[in-house]
Amino acid sequence: MNRVEPDTLAPPTAWAHATPAVEILSAEKTYPNGTQALLPVDLKIAEGEFITLLGPSGCGKSTLLKMVAGMLEPTDGRLLVWRKPVAELHDCPHKLSFVFQSATLMPWASVQTNVRLPLDLAGVPRKEADARVAEALELVGLDKFAGALPRALSGGMQMRVSIARGLVTQPDLLLMDEPFGALDEITRHRLDADLLDLWRKKKLTVIFVTHSIHEAVFLSSRVIMMAARPGRVVEQFTIDEPYPRTPDFMVSPQFSRYAKQLQDSLLRASGAHEETSR
Ligand SMILES: Nc1ncnc2c1ncn2[C@@H]1O[C@H](COP(=O)(O)OP(=O)(O)OP(=O)(O)O)[C@@H](O)[C@H]1O
């Protein structure tokens, strides 16, 4: 694993020449109640990267992700997605999707109707929408459950429905806010592996928020470590391991080394928080 200094803006070597998908340019956020959620962040994410935001609670991971999505305005600085302000993305052939921590499905509607929602809202004709829903459900392995109601599904399956709903608009950029945090370990591992398959198959760029060091090592091409109060980026790590990553990788000595480095960094980041709150 290569440790990258925090003030290094560019993605690591393997991605250095790729088109930037996301450029965060001195973007900072203070909420109206005065909470300084993020000091200026400078970060470039290349097309095709799998980036993880890791850090103690309250370090601004969700705030940063929501700013990339255009759900929150930065107090200062700029964010560009495919070189455009996110508010202008509707004129751009690229799309982004946001997947939340809980599946947030409509309980009264079938899996198919839940997944079709973004297409219905966008006015996509029914025939085309149904074909795209079928494709998205197949991608997440739920094609046989199109007619089921959410309550008939396990937590992991509901999360797959939520991912299918994220994929149905055929996004290029997937923003995921701790999507598997509430799931048991085995289900989480399975969904992590499936997500990596989707990322490769669909050539997605992913920004993924997690509290799990193991998930970060397994998934990421780069991990951004953040610290709290005020939220900021403190270190970056390249996970210099080839894909596809198999379960064997998780029990390898390299994996343990990466996990140890991230754990030390997380302790430093958490310590920085304690220092500033004393
Ligand atoms: N709408 C809001 N108004 C005021 N303060 C907020 C708001 N949303 C978040 N905050 C504060 O901003 C800081 C960053 O919050 P954020 O949710 O981005 O952190 P996080 O790293 O995602 O946390 P967690 O890991 O616990 O989900 C925290 O101190 C939080 O209390």
Image (cartoon, rainbow, N blue to C red):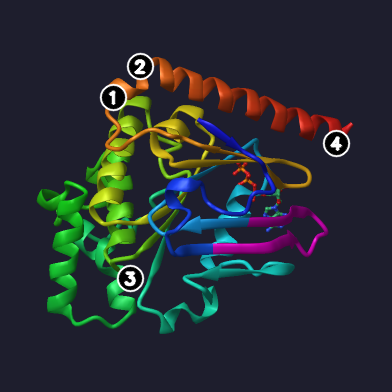
Is residue 40 within the magenta segment? yes
Q: Main secondary structure of the magenta part?
A: strand
- C-alpha span from label 3 to label 4: 43 Å
48 shown above or below 158 = below
Residue designated by label 4: 276
Q: Nearer the viewer, mark 3 or mark 4?
A: 4
**Disc number placed over residue 251 in the picture, else none:** 2
Q: Is mark 2 within 8 Å of ligand 1?
A: no
- C-alpha span from label 2 to label 1: 7 Å
> Which residue of the protein is positioned furthest toward the right in this rendering?
278
- Residues at circles 1 and 4 in contact by the CB criterion of under 8 Å: no
205 shown above or below 117 = above
Question: How far across and how far down the image is residue 203, in percent?
Answer: 29, 56
Q: Amino acid at mark 4?
A: Thr
Determine the residue positioned at 61% across, 62% down: 24
Q: Nearer the viewer, mark 3 or mark 2?
A: 2
| Residue 122, image quadrant | bottom left
Q: Nearer the viewer, residue 88 or 200?
A: 200
Question: How far across and how far down the image is residue 26, in percent?
Answer: 71, 62
Residue designated by label 3: 118
